Amino acid sequence: MTYCVAMNLAEGLVFVSDSRTNAGVDNIATFRKLHVFGVPGERLIVLQSAGNLATSQSVVSLLRQRLDSAGQHLHNVASLFDAATLVGDTIREVLTRDSGATLSQGVELGCSILLGGQIRGAAPALYNLYPQGNFIAATEDTPYFQIGESKYGKPILDRALNYRTPLQQALRCSLISFDSTIRSNLSVGMPLDLLVYRADSLEVPAGFRIHEGNAYFEGIRQQWCAGLRELLTQLPAPPGEYWG
């Protein structure tokens, strides 16, 4: 399983992905699920993937191979909408290629992809691409998307995040969302890959990988846990009739 979250906020974009894949408890591996395409000063496009690893790797590999082609690719599309359309077409291409009876029998080949970034002359954008290749865009009302094992990390995002949330606070929020998910689901795990992009900078950030034992991550997850316990003790006592 996988967990990825991406945010399109007033100040910019936040992307965080885990890196665990598993095909059973005895077959766990680490694969990067956050992929960066960009031309400094001109565009940044970030992909995050969940679902069938072979499919998502094929999609990303094809997109990279075609950067030098004469046709349309992620370094020359005119808009993020066109980029999402191109990635959706590539998903369908891979599924068509691999969906023969021998390969697909009993195997779920679909993958989901989050695509976000900015192209010079346009505002930042974020899209959620479904396994069928169609997609929806993030809005000010719904400024974030999740793919993969999303249910454990969603409550903190719903309660604490909005379009005007500062990037630094949004990153903290996303990391706590991952802490909640990792605590509740063994199929999501470290290391975490993150990338923060400031709107209109048109830079291509290197991103950062948080490994197990990272001092900052361990500190905030412990502080969050302790804060929840302390807050629980401060809530009003239940009325007497609640005790039957």
Image (cartoon, helix red, strand yellow):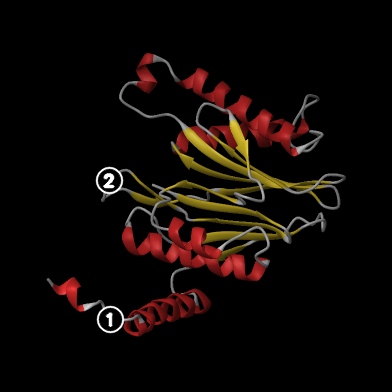
Percent from the top left, x then y, of residue 120?
85, 46
Front-most of residues 24 and 65: 24
Percent from the top left, x then y, of residue 30?
44, 53
Front-most of residues 76 and 137: 137
Name the residue located 82 percent from the left edge and 56 percent from the top edge.
200
- The residue that label 2 is drawn on is 24
Kind of element beneath mark 1: loop
Describe residue 86's horizontal placement relative to residue 107 as left or right.
right
The kind of residue tagged 1 is Ala
Percent from the top left, x then y, of residue 215?
50, 79
**Which quadrant holds residue 165?**
bottom right
Q: Which quadrant of the figure contains the C terminus?
A: bottom left
Front-most of residues 201 and 154: 154
Describe residue 26's horizontal placement relative to residue 209 as left or right.
left
Name the residue located 48 percent from the left edge and 56 percent from the top edge.
18
- The residue that label 1 is drawn on is 237
